[in-house]
Structures are given as structure tokens and as C-alpha cells.
Image (cartoon, helix red, strand yellow):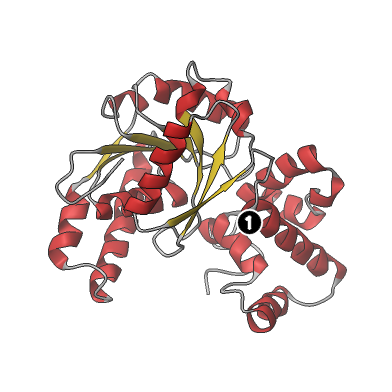
Amino acid sequence: MTVDKDSQHHVGIVGGGTMGVGIAYVFAVAGAAVTVVEPVIARHSTFLATIDEALKGAVERSKLSSVAASAARDRLRLVAAIDAIEAHSSLVIETVPEQLELKQQVLGQIEATSPALIATNTSAISIDVLAASLRDPSQFLGMHFFNPVWSLPLVELICGQATSEESLDAARAAVADIGKESIVVADIPGFATSRLDMGAALEAMRMLEDGVASAEDIDRAAVLAYRHPVGPLRLSDIVGLDVRLDIARTLERAHGPRFAPPKILIDLVAQGRLGVKTGRGFHDWNE
């Protein structure tokens, strides 16, 4: 897939949450016509407000001209159902929560729209397991983006056993078209980046449980001593503690107790303290 400012390429994004917003943004800015599926109509205004704020910031930082920002906004379309995606799109990416049955159901519905390439943004679930829901898994692979999508330059590509070389080449081209770099990793639960990330995050949570230091100081240690752009507990709040818990449980099933979610994470999710999206997690985001 080659995307340019005059292209008629269509990209579908299923899921209008944090990752869906970022992925839609980068493809629209690159020139693709983007259809975003968000079944909860009440979330549409939040989605568009986030897009508008990101475009405004890009203009203020001279990353985009006002004309380019307006054109990118015009290329975005919000719908409530998967069957409203443009038929035969170049690429459709699912970004729904890390729940196996939900993802399999969504992927089957995406395939019915006959896209050239289908991708999942999963950060932990096996591509081969997800591919079982598809009639033609050769057109399917993982495209794992990172939050915030508009800032972070990496996309992790994960091939299943049936993923064709043509599909991998198309995914590489799509990543290059949006100005990012890709790595190719094996279909092992957690892939490369999620295992690195979750290992640090879960250990930071255990340190907090053990009273090693406060959440603020654990994060400061990662930032100041190891030059991480953000600490592991603050990053967990940004990702969403419910998402962290889903990923930890997936990795625990695959790799054993080293990825078992700490009690503090389980308790915070049960209390509805999910991080940024609820205002409180390991940190207070209302301040």
C-alpha cells in the first residue's frame, strides 16, 4: 500500500479508544481516507475532540500546516458498525480490548468487508490463535502500535504461520508510508516489546507493594537513572490498568508466574481505578 496526499486508499480502524484515535490520526495525516468504527455513539464526540486537539497541537508546533490539518480532519469518518467500512479497503486494523473472543468476532466481521490486508493491534495474543477466526489467514498479521501513536516511531509486525510474504511487504509499506519504522518478531505471546514493557511494569508494581518507594519515586528512578521518557507506573496509568491486567493474565498463561499480575493491580482494577481514563490509578490524574 502506498499512501500519498492525493490517494484514494481506504484504511479502516475498528475501535475508537486511545489506540484507535492515534492510528486513525497518523493514517489520515499521511493521506488515507480513514473510517473509524466506534459502536458507542456517545464516545464519538470524545474521539473527535481528541483528534482536533492533536491536529491543533501539530499546527502550533509547525508539524502540519493549517491546510494539511484541515484536510486530514476531512479524511476521517466515524461509523457505528463494521459493515459501514469501505469495501475492499487497503488495510483494516482492529484495536478492540485484549479479549480473545471479542477480537475473533471482530476479525471475522472485518474479513466480510474484503480488505486487502487485515491487522490486529494486539500486544500479547497469539496471531495464529486470532487467525483461526478467518477464512484466509494469509492476509492477516499483527501491527502493534505504541501510545502515543503520533509520537512513537515504532510498529511491531507479527507474522502468523499463514501470513504471506505479500501481506508482510504490504504492512511494511504501510508503516513506512506513515513515517514510522518496523521490526518483525515471532508469534510468541507478548512478542518482543510487550514482554520487555510488562516485565518492568509488573516489577515496579511489586516494588510498590513491598514498600520499596512511592509510585512517584519509582517512576523518577526509571526516568532519571535509565532515561526512560516516562516511568513504568505512570505509563501503566496511561495505557490503562485494565489493559495491563488483561495483558498480564495472557502472558501468565503463556509464560508462567513471572508475569502473574500483582495484587495491587488486581485491586485497583476492581476499584475502578484504571489510570488516566478514570482520573486515578497509581497516580492521581485529577490534580
131 vs 35, nearest the viewer = 131
In terms of image quadrants, where is residue 38?
top left
Look at the image and tell me in which quarter the N terminus lies: top left
Across and down, in percent, residue 176 comes to 37, 53
Question: Is residue 198 placed above or below 223 in the rendered structure?
Answer: above
Across and down, in percent, residue 180 comes to 41, 57
Question: Is residue 207 placed above or below 220 in the rendered structure?
Answer: above
**Residue on which the image places disc 1:** 273
Q: Residue furthest bottom?
A: 224
Q: Is residue 162 left or right of residue 68?
A: right
- For label 1, count other residues whose C-alpha is less than 10 Å away and answer few (under 14), some (14-19) or many (20+): many
Q: Residue furthest front?
A: 165
Amino acid residing under circle 1: Arg
Q: Residue furthest top?
A: 135
Question: Is residue 271 placed above or below 152 in the rendered structure?
Answer: above
Residue pictured at 31% horizontal, 38% vertical: 11
Q: Is residue 241 left or right of residue 171?
A: right
Note whether residue 37 is visible: no
Residue pictured at 20% horizontal, 46% vertical: 75
Residue pictured at 25% horizontal, 67% vertical: 56
139 vs 206, nearest the viewer = 139
Across and down, in percent, residue 113 comes to 34, 22
Across and down, in percent, residue 285 comes to 54, 68
Q: Is residue 147 left or right of residue 70?
A: right
Note whether residue 230 is visible: yes
Residue pictured at 34% horizontal, 57% vertical: 50
Question: Is residue 172 placed above or below 113 in the rendered structure?
Answer: below
| Element carrying mark 1 | loop
